[in-house]
Image (cartoon, helix red, strand yellow):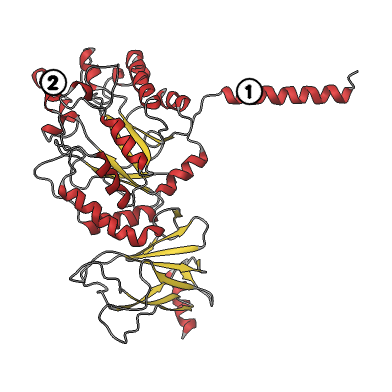
Amino acid sequence: MFTTLTLRSYFTVLLVSLFLQAASAQPQVTNQPERVQWFQDLGFGLFIHWNVDVTLGAVISHSLSGASDEYVERYFKDLPQYFNPEKFDPVAWAKLAKLAGMKYVVFTTKHHSGFCMFKTATTPFNVMNTPFGRDITKEIIDAFRREGIAIGIYFSPEDFYYFHQNKIPIGRLQLPQHYPANNPGLMAYDKRQLQELMTQYGKIDILFIDGPGDGLREYAWSLQPDLVITRDLMKTPEQVTPNEPLPRPWEACYTMGTDWGYKPTNDPHKTGTQVINMLVEIRAKGGNFLLNVGPKPNGEIQIEQEALLQEVALWNFANAEAIYKVKPLPIIREENIWYTQSNDEKYIYAYVLRSGADDWKYGDRKALVLTHIEGNANTKVSILGYKSELVEYKKDFDAKTYLAPTPIGLVVSAVNGQRFYTNNRWPNAVVLKIENAKFRKLNTAKSTQSAIDGAK
């Protein structure tokens, strides 16, 4: 026989059960918080822009927008016949990315042109209908996954080939039909392609939707709930770093030269120091750094870009600890010194950027005053990658790191003693690891002067 209490308990359990069922039936509307944290901790990724127009060296896809009928017809008909990257080696790409410290990859499975770099039943305009005739997306995913690198795909909801086939003027977000939400045919077409991408290649970690994602985000999550969607849900500035930290998460997307795809001429590249300094600044501001390569028509990464990745690899080999699983301090820099802290707040990292090899020369001692760091008797400072005991060929040389907590901040005296170049002219940032210290806020220049006066 049921008592009043028993009935009340029964109905409570029933209501909770119905509520949980209803909640579980709701479509996913945002990235899972724990997956966002996972993404932020990755820190550094490789963007790969590759498309059928690589044989021309033109801007990827965008030359179709506003082009003449003749140009458009030749693009769609002729260019696939030239796509045959005989030196394509995704295993080498993946190993180079891993060496450079990249934790994730984002590959252009379909750019705006509509050319699919994967095996698809949705369109003949795909990599299988080229002299190459292989599923490039699968080979890239397999190679990077074997190196332990998280897998991301770039996908354009706008599709110039679809527009052309359906007599829609080719452009980007200029007509209602350019938006899948306003174009049921385009929405169904995109969903079929996403279904292929989300079910043919195992677990996909990241989706970069370069265009309007309404309806597509939810569909992608229904196939891969752990998916982190970056562009379309996060700030992903291109070729610019914000002056101030953005609310996390965010991701800065940069080319090494001036273009995303391969550009054979008129394309000056950044220096290794510029790329390393960008990595430091973006991480200090709480962002991820997605650095792009544009493979050549034959499938090789051009030597300038390979060399930049190798220089980043050398720097990261010594300093990787300061790049991953870190977050910004309330003050991100003072002059040429940038800061982060470990997620558990046990360590503060101070990245000392240099204007060149003559700024804090190899073997020289330098005094630094970290005005926003408060030290104590237990504070320790070390240089990442360097033991601070010896400087090569210098006998009886004191290379130790000294520190002193003072009213004006933590004073550090350190030697730049690790040899990376034969000519000793390595120009890149030196990173200090600081233990048992904390951030201190200085409200005004007046408070700084008061601290100086108190130290006299």
| Nearer to us in this view, 375 or 199 | 199
Q: Secondary structure at mark 1?
A: helix
Mark 2 crowdedness (10 Å alpha carbons): few <14, some 14-19, many ≥20: some
Q: Residue at x 19, y 20 (%)?
A: 129
Q: Secondary structure at mark 2?
A: helix
Q: Is residue 389 left or right of residue 158?
A: right
- Mark 2 to mark 1: distance in Å? 51 Å
The disc label shown at residue 21, or none:
1
Q: Residue at x 31, y 49 (%)?
A: 241
The vertical placement of 402 against 142, above or below, is below
The disc label shown at residue 72, or none:
2
Mark 1 crowdedness (10 Å alpha carbons): few <14, some 14-19, many ≥20: few
The vertical placement of 251 against 3, above or below, is below
Q: What amino acid is labelled 2 in the image?
A: Val
Closer to us: mark 2 or mark 1?
1
| Nearer to us in this view, 428 or 196 | 196
The image quadrant of residue 231 is top left
The disc label shown at residue 300, or none:
none
The vertical placement of 147 against 6, above or below, is below
Q: What amino acid is labelled 1 in the image?
A: Gln
Q: Position of residue 285 (x, y in %)?
A: 39, 53
Q: Position of residue 323 (x, y in %)?
A: 39, 55
Q: Residue at x 26, y 70 (%)?
A: 419
Tell me which numbered mark, 2 or 1, is placed earlier along the sequence: 1
